[in-house]
Amino acid sequence: MSETLAIINARLVDPASGHDGPGSVLIEGDTIIAVGSDINVDAADEIIDAKGCILAPALIDLRASKEPGLTPDGENLATLAAGAAAGGIGTVVLAPNSVTPHDKPENLGAMIRDMMGAPVRMRVAAGATVGLAGSSMAEMGLMAKAGAVYVGCGDRPIADSNIMRRVFSYASHLDLWVACRPADAALSDGTIALESDWSARLGLPAEPAISERIAIERDASLAELSGGKLMIDRLSTASGLEALRHVRQRDIEIASSVAIAHLTLNEIDAGDLDGAFRMTPPLRAESDRVALVEAIAQGEIDAVVSDHRPTPFDDKGEPYANAVPGTLGLETLLASMLGLVHDGQLELIDALRVLTCGPADILGLPQGRISEGAPADLILIHGDVPWVCNPEDFKSPRGNTAWAGRRFQGRVLQTLIGGCIIHNYNE
Amino acid sequence: MTRAAFSYQFPHRHLLSVADLNPVDISQLFERAAHWLAVNRTPDKSSDTLKGLTVLNLFFEASTRTQGSFEMAAQRLGADVVNFAVATSSASKGESLSDTARTLAAMRPDIMVVRHNATGAPKFLADRTGLSVINAGDGMHEHPTQALLDCFTLSNHWGSVGGRRILIVGDILHSRVARSNIGLLNILGAEIRLCAPPTLLPLDVDQWGVDVFHDLDEALEGCDAVMALRQQKERMSGGFVPSGREFFHLFGLTHERLEVCAPDVLVMHPGPMNRGVEIHTKLADDPDISVILEQVESGVAIRMAALELLGANIRKGGKS
């Protein structure tokens, strides 16, 4: 018989069941065996008194990235996993991007073997086309066999509608989601900012928000035609949201993610042209941000992702226009979301839904919920601990965060994965 | 020294954007430029105003006239001038701009004149080096000394640009000259008109304190000055405008079209010109109307004024 662990006196928040109230959890081995307010914990081998802190499922992040293997001083699997654990993230999906395209089954297989020993659950998404160039399909089937959980296009949309159609069509027989950045390739090519008064005055090459709408309409139509499953990879504008609502009226399998940056920052944060705020998609207008937060409250968004992207400082040692896009996000994902809760923009349970059962349900994962039989992937959160984001304190060796200097409220005290405590705040 | 110059100290350590200047700063720059303009017409042009200071010309984009103008200005003021040839240096070896900046700053220059294709690069360098930085053009953002020399040229004719009607015609969208001029002319109280096809206008440009026209003849009515912008050839071949000749027929400046302007209308161009695309060659060379060469002359004077005022603040160790 495995060891048993009880967590008692918690504020149990489980978005999957809609429960937010006092409760306890009993864990045997790596599985939750009982949940409720009247479970018998006397027989437990070990008891953790949560003292009223929030107990939630460990978070699931569908989009993060590390640096290419052997990058000197770079983010590797170990630092990435440590950062995820500290940020309360129990499952991390490494998504393809231009420097790590995940387009070869042999490389992907080796990577997945390397991930086996990580303290958090790590998964990989495969590149849909070779080199993410959008011209010929990658070996999706072999990569799915190796363990890829979805296929994606990275930051650059597949411009050719014929290729896009075939990717949907081919991925459908493997039952894989196709993650597409919602951007019209031509309208977004070479742009670094949202088309707005700000970018026009600064003379920045800019992308109109309707680029997202056009892409969503196209991709949804192609998915409908070919029976594919469309995952809108980082919706970022109100215009795109309108398109999402529109295409959801049809009979298409659609999921949508939003990056945490687009929920907590807007283009004005980049107003001083600090390269730390250069990202893909670019930061949007405040009205876009508000619309996205509202959409989460309405349950229209399935997942919020960290879009964690470690970048050497030297690459950010350039003016905004030339800086490599991307920000770290694993260690600030939860705190940024809690900021929206503290500000009264979101309910806690809604904020956690898109970080737990939302993404779990897209991929059909058993974790991301607190229920009998589910994996014991849990986090204990003190919702009020104040802290200041200092990149020096990160587990990541990189420091390219858009939240540097931000004041946060709320911290992960403990992270449990498969019943094992893998992170303790005070340690 | 005039009363205004005596009682008000030019407070800036950098010249990054016209938006940082107030009308008194501008009149101080113009007063000093007028002084240097006169000096530059004598055979005794050298001064030792900046003696002991080093001016570094850091041009990441090719430039002949702006770089030459800054170089001449700094040399006439007695500064040591170094032209850093960026195309053949570390930037092409993959060094980041912040590393380049730190390296150059370690050589202890005093003023850095920067042109770069990225918006904000001069400010980026100012933040990271602690040197005085003059923006000599950043991306499609600003080119403050160009706007200052344009307004200085006009005010030499009129006394002041306030209340005058000035038209800027051509590729506003990609033009840092237009952005700086719109900012500066607004500060100085001019009435600004823009004329271009919609493909060459920035988003919501009508919010920038200007009147927008698509018809040149309408736009020219009653104008005291017309500024043609340089049209880049690659944008004149179907991408933004169908052809150079179509552009000339719709938006090119000619003597005939200028008849609806104010009687003593002045024509300006920041150079280099594409004769027969944005301006008729005869008009460009008409000394009664065209002030294009005066602009070039003013350019040296205005850059001397800027270098002088920044240099004075460096000597004081002042911060701004």
Image: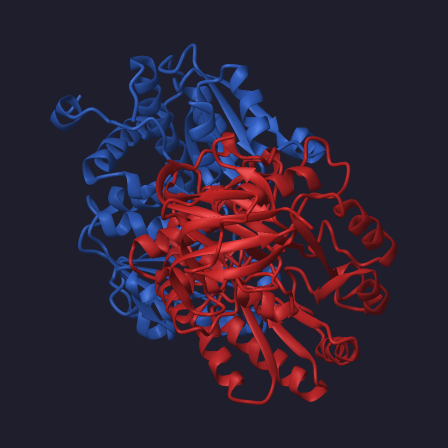
Question: Which one is in front, A205 or A293?
Answer: A293
Residue B305: % across, % down: 33, 28
Picture quadrant of residue B303:
top left
Residue at screen point 23% across, 34% down: B25
> Where's residue A217, x and y in %?
56, 81
Residue A245 location in percent, x, y?
47, 81
Chain letter for the part of the structure drawn in blue: B
Q: How many marks?
A: 0
Q: Is residue B84 something one can see in this rendering? A: yes
- Tell me which residue sits at (61%, 49%) in the image: A419
- The tint chain A carries is red
Give above or below for B205 relative to A29: below
Judge by depth and name the residue closer to the eye, A419 or A396.
Answer: A419
Viewer can see residue B63 = no
Residue A247 vertical placement versus B59 (above, below)? below
In the rendered image, residue B94, in percent from the top left (x then y), is placed at 69, 34
Q: How is the image coloured?
A: by chain
